[in-house]
Amino acid sequence: MSNYLRRNEPALVKDAAWRDGLYSLFKVLRQKIKDKKDTIWAFVLKNVFKPLLLRERFDILVGNPPWLSYRYVERGAYQEFLKAEITGHYGLLKGRPELLTHMELGTLFFVRATDLYLREGGQIGFVLPKSVFVADQHHAFRQGNPAA
């Protein structure tokens, strides 16, 4: 990965924060793979940064995000990250913080994928659970402008 970054993304190699962050991530993922704790890590290690390194965004995004409610996330640090994204950055609850535990993470995945990867005027289609279309915690998402 180091050689790839030097050749294709020299600015990232020069940026200490990016370089240190990537090194830390790869170190943890390498250990997970070595310890055979989870077979998904090899896939993540090989593919997670490819979209981030792309210069262009996509015309069409299609996906089947994880169907998991916020309340089932067990790691506290990850819960805090998700909470900040849901209530702060993307404003998916619009003044209804009491609904956070019921929030379907697929909606966050949808808006974040749109934000990071979808070209202006592009189209997105995701498989989402029924609750996204009827439940109160997804009202802002259904309105189409949750962060507004």
Image (cartoon, rainbow, N blue to C red):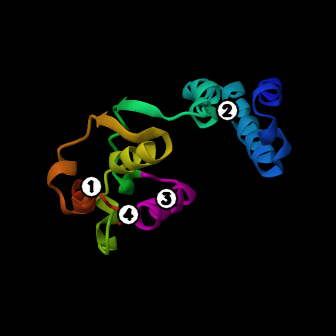
User: Foreground residue, 78 or 132?
Assistant: 132
Q: Does dot 2 land on a helix, a strand or a loop?
A: helix
At 34% from the left and 32% from the top, the residue drawn is 64
137 lies left or right of 38: left
29 lies left or right of 19: left
Q: CA distance from mark 1 to mark 2?
A: 38 Å
99 lies left or right of 37: left
The residue that mark 3 highlights is 79
The residue that mark 1 highlights is 144
Residue 12 included in the magenta stretch of the image: no
Q: CA distance from mark 3 to mark 4?
A: 20 Å
| Label 2, residues with CA under 10 Å away: few <14, some 14-19, many ≥20 | some
Label disc, if present, on residue 147 of the rendered structure:
4
Q: CA distance from mark 3 to mark 1?
A: 24 Å
| Amino acid type, mark 1 | Gly
Q: Which residues are magenta?
A: 73-90
User: Foreground residue, 79 or 107?
Assistant: 107
Quadrant in the picture for residue 51:
top right
